[in-house]
Image: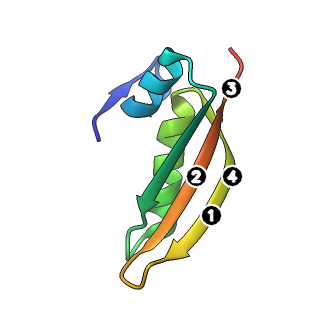
């Protein structure tokens, strides 16, 4: 995943930024959580998407036997 800086807000998820620029109403992502630091991994990921102009609205966790996953839905923020 490539990242860029946005107005001093820190790293931004470029895919989320493109979806916002395109005018999408929502953004969905699913990630495999890091086996050693799942919370830190998830927090950093959500922060990059929120920096691109999205707000986390829904989150679900699953385990496929090999990996823990987190599915997320984001809504556009105003502005």
Q: Residue at x 54, y 44 (%)?
A: 28
List the residue tagged with mark 1: 60
Q: Residue at x 48, y 26 (%)?
A: 19
The quadrant of the picture occupied by the C terminus is: top right
**For discs 3 and 4, the disc positioned in front in the rendered view:** 4
List the residue tagged with mark 3: 77
**For discs 3 and 1, the disc positioned in front in the rendered view:** 1
List the residue tagged with mark 4: 58
Tag 1 near tag 2, CB within 8 Å:
yes
Q: Residue at x 46, y 32 (%)?
A: 16
Tag 4 near tag 1, CB within 8 Å:
yes
SS of the residue under disc 2:
strand
The 10 Å Cα crowd at callout 3, few under 14, some 14 to 19, many 20 or more, is: some
SS of the residue under disc 4:
strand
List the residue tagged with mark 2: 72
Asked where in the image residue 18 lies, by quadrant, the reply is top left
Tag 2 near tag 4, CB within 8 Å:
yes
The outermost residue toward the bottom is 65
The earlier-in-sequence mark between 1 and 2 is 1
How far apart are labels 3 and 4 at the CA level?
14 Å
Image coords of residue 14 (percent x, y)? 37, 30
- The residue closer to the viewer here, 57 or 25, is 25
Q: Is residue 75 visible?
A: yes
- The residue closer to the viewer here, 26 or 42, is 26
The quadrant of the picture occupied by the N terminus is: top left
Tag 2 near tag 3, CB within 8 Å:
no
The earlier-in-sequence mark between 3 and 1 is 1
């Amino acid at each position: 995943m490539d990242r860029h800086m946005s107005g001093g807000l820190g790293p931004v998820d470029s895919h989320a930024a493109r979806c916002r620029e395109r005018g999408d109403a929502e953004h969905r992502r699913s990630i495999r959580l890091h086996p050693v630091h799942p919370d830190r991994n998830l927090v950093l990921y959500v922060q990059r998407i929120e920096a691109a102009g999205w707000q986390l609205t829904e989150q679900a966790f699953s385990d496929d036997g090999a990996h823990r996953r987190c599915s997320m839905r984001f809504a556009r923020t105003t502005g």
